């Protein structure tokens, strides 16, 4: 088990996803954020089944930074209830994880 996580969120606009990605990396809350999309999401919202195109952000970080990551995403995210999920990294290349730890150290 490692102390590393991937945090995923989705946004309606690519520009919002890129703003979240940049903020997380600039604040050293993530070593890397990949923006993927568009993806098609189907979900239930306010009693209706909706389908929308969205952009995903996958932020690579450390478990101890999750609260700050969530706060940053919430501050920048346009959705009333944004998807913010943290997934544990159970294994990874030692070189990559060392790089990720160095890039997310709070200076």
Image: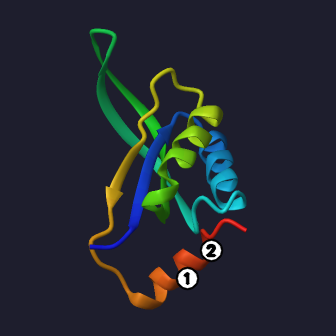
Q: Residue furthest top?
A: 47
Give percent across and percent down for residue 88: 31, 61
Q: Residue at x 53, y 76 (%)?
A: 100
Whether pointer 1 and pointer 2 mark residues with C-beta atoms closer than 8 Å, the reply is: yes
> The C terminus appears in which quarter of the rendering?
bottom right
Q: Residue at x 63, y 46 (%)?
A: 20
Tell me if 107 is positioned left or right of 17 in this view. right
The image shows residue 75, relative to residue 89, as above or below, that is above
**Residue 99 badge:** 1
Tell me if 92 is positioned left or right of 102 in this view. left
Q: Which residue is mark 2?
A: 103
Kind of element beneath mark 1: helix
> The N terminus appears in which quarter of the rendering?
bottom left
Kind of element beneath mark 2: helix
Q: How is the image coloured?
A: rainbow
The image shows residue 44, relative to residue 69, as above or below, that is above
The image shows residue 97, relative to residue 50, as above or below, that is below
Q: How far apart are labels 1 and 2 at the CA level?
A: 6 Å
Tally the numbered discs: 2
Give percent across and percent down for residue 80: 50, 20
Q: Nearer the viewer, residue 87 or 63?
A: 63
Q: Residue at x 57, y 62 (%)?
A: 30
């Amino acid at each position: 088990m490692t102390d590393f996580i991937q945090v995923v969120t989705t946004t309606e606009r690519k520009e919002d996803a890129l703003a979240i990605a940049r903020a997380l990396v600039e604040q050293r809350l993530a070593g890397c954020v990949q923006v993927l999309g568009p993806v098609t999401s189907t979900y239930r919202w306010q009693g209706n089944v909706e389908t929308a195109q969205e952009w995903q952000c996958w932020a690579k970080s450390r478990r101890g930074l999750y609260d700050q990551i969530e706060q940053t995403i919430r501050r920048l995210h346009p959705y009333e209830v944004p998807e913010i999920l943290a997934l544990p990294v159970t294994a990874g290349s030692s070189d990559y994880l060392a790089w990720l730890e160095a890039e997310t150290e709070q200076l």
